[in-house]
Image (tube, helix red, strand yellow):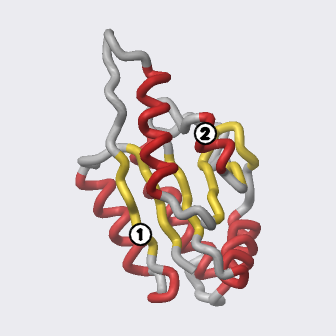
Amino acid sequence: MRLSVFAVGTRMPDWVTAGCTEYGKRMPPELRIKTIEIALGARGKSQSSSKAIETEGRAILKAIGEKDFVVALDVLGKSMSTTLLASNLARWQMDGHDVSLLIGGPDGLSADCLDRANMRWSLSDLTLPHPLVRILLMEQLYRAWTINANHPYHRN
């Protein structure tokens, strides 16, 4: 199984890169997380944000595998506890399918990406900036792995 994070936006601030790198290197070799950055669609006075979202969505859908289990991070998705995430991670590992986690840009994911998703996950009811979502996602994946590995990082 391969875990891939498809994130809209490039040239993240150093603190985002450092945070993602730190949690990424803590993952075991069999669960290394690959991050694929997707360029932001053009936004401006002459270009609607819906066109940008569609452009980003097409790029994401082109990059993910046809048989991947797709998890879209979406404010309208279902929330889950860390222990439920750990159970899902264990199930994904047993199923053996590659897992693609999708993080939209400042305006979210396209309808096509949401339709393609096998699961919609909301990290929080709060509005979070998409760079921060990257770090939160990486930390929660690491925490889920530590629960499954009986590592002392997570405390109930």
First in sequence: mark 1 vs mark 2: 1
> What mark, if any, has residue 51 been given in the picture?
none
Position of 34 compared to 140: left or right? left
Examine the image and state in which quarter residue 24 appears.
Answer: bottom left
Position of the C terminus by quadrant = bottom right
Above or below: residue 6 compared with residue 122:
below
Which residue lies at the image location 39% right of the left edge and 63% below the top edge?
35
Q: Please tell me how crowded label 1 is: few (under 14), some (14-19), or many (20+) other residues with Cα within 10 Å.
A: few
SS at circle 1: strand
Which residue lies at the image location 62% right of the left edge and 35% below the top edge?
111
**Percent from the top left, x then y, of residue 20?**
38, 64
SS at circle 2: helix
Examine the image and state in which quarter residue 82 appears.
Answer: bottom right
Above or below: residue 74 compared with residue 90:
above
**Which residue in the structure is indicated by mark 1?**
34
Closer mark to the observer between disc 1 and disc 2: 2
Tag 2: residue type?
A: Asp
**Percent from the top left, x then y, of residue 16?**
33, 54
Position of 10 compared to 145: left or right? left
**Percent from the top left, x then y, of residue 128?**
51, 39
Position of the N terminus by quadrant = bottom right
Tag 1: residue type?
A: Lys
Which residue lies at the image location 53% right of the left edge and 52% below the top edge?
102
**Which residue in the structure is indicated by mark 2?**
112
